Image: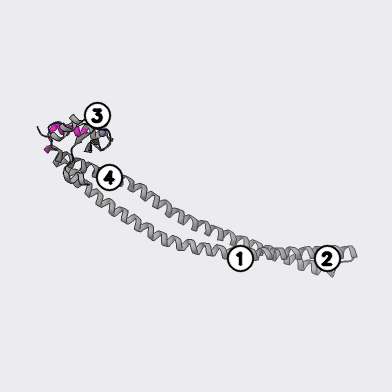
Amino acid sequence: MDIDYEKLIHLQELDKEIISTSLFLDNVPIQIEKINKKKEECSQILTLAKEKITHNQKKRRDLEAEVKDTKEKASKYNRQLNEVKTNIEYKSLLKEIEETQQKIDRLEEEIISEMLFADEIEEEIKAATQKQSEEGMRFSEEKKSLEHEKEELESKRKELEQEKKQILPQIPPDQRNIYLNIFKKNNSIALSPVKGEFCSMCHVRVRPQMLNEIKGEEKIILCENCGRILYWPKKSEKAE
Ligand SMILES: [Zn+2]
């Protein structure tokens, strides 16, 4: 019985396509997870900046309250100046007033630097907000196109599997079983064209007598090294 290489090759092409389609489909959830993670990172940057501004506002309020308290203390000391009886008391009060004023200066400087810092944070928030909206759009577009591609490939895979179902019974059972066994073992590639005098999959030389048998196409010849079905490529395939 002649070997139906045409159908075997067709079957192999279908299998290759089914596998690469499945690989892509298996990868889709991973891709979507990646996009979600990036999206989350974006919003986390914004959340952090917002937390910073809240913290900054609270700090400024605290500092302002402290300035207010310290100023009240200073005016109390100033009022007390008129009431002191001794020189020592007077001097010590003056020292208190000076220290209080120093404290006020220090606090006011701190308020200014916190205000400058607030400007920086506001810029950060603005940039993060913009980035979030731009990236957000990009991410949803990426997701949409992935979903679209997924749908297309799923229907393509269905068609391929349908075609495979149709072609399988057309191949003589012994040839089909040899193919299917090697296909399972060899990670999808069950056929190997002979190029020159070599198995094109494992590059081991094919013995001349085997070459003749392969060209005869009367029985299935397996590569002695990798175990794949060897075949003599048609002219069109050789040209590739
Ligand atoms: Zn081989």
Mark earlier in primary sequence (1, 4): 4
Mark closer to the observer (3, 1): 3
- Mark 3, ligand 1, within 8 Å: the answer is yes
Task: Give me the C-alpha separation between circle 2 and circle 1.
Answer: 33 Å
Task: Give me the C-alpha separation between circle 2 and circle 4.
Answer: 87 Å
Place residue 56 in its image quadrant.
Answer: bottom right
Instruction: Name the amino acid type tagged 4.
Output: Ser
- As drawn, is 138 to the left or to the right of 150? right
Q: How crowded is mark 4: few (under 14 residues within 10 Å), some or many (20 or more)?
A: few
Mark earlier in primary sequence (2, 1): 2
Instruction: Name the amino acid type tagged 2.
Output: Leu
- Which residue matches tag 4? 20
Q: Residue 116 carries which label?
A: 1
Instruction: Name the amino acid type tagged 1.
Output: Leu
Disc 2 + disc 4, Cβ < 8 Å: no
The residue stretch that appears in magenta: 170-180
- Ligand 1 image-quadrant field: top left
Disc 3 + disc 4, Cβ < 8 Å: no
Q: Can residue 86 be seen in this view?
A: no
- Which residue matches tag 2? 94
Task: Give me the C-alpha separation between circle 3 and circle 1.
Answer: 78 Å
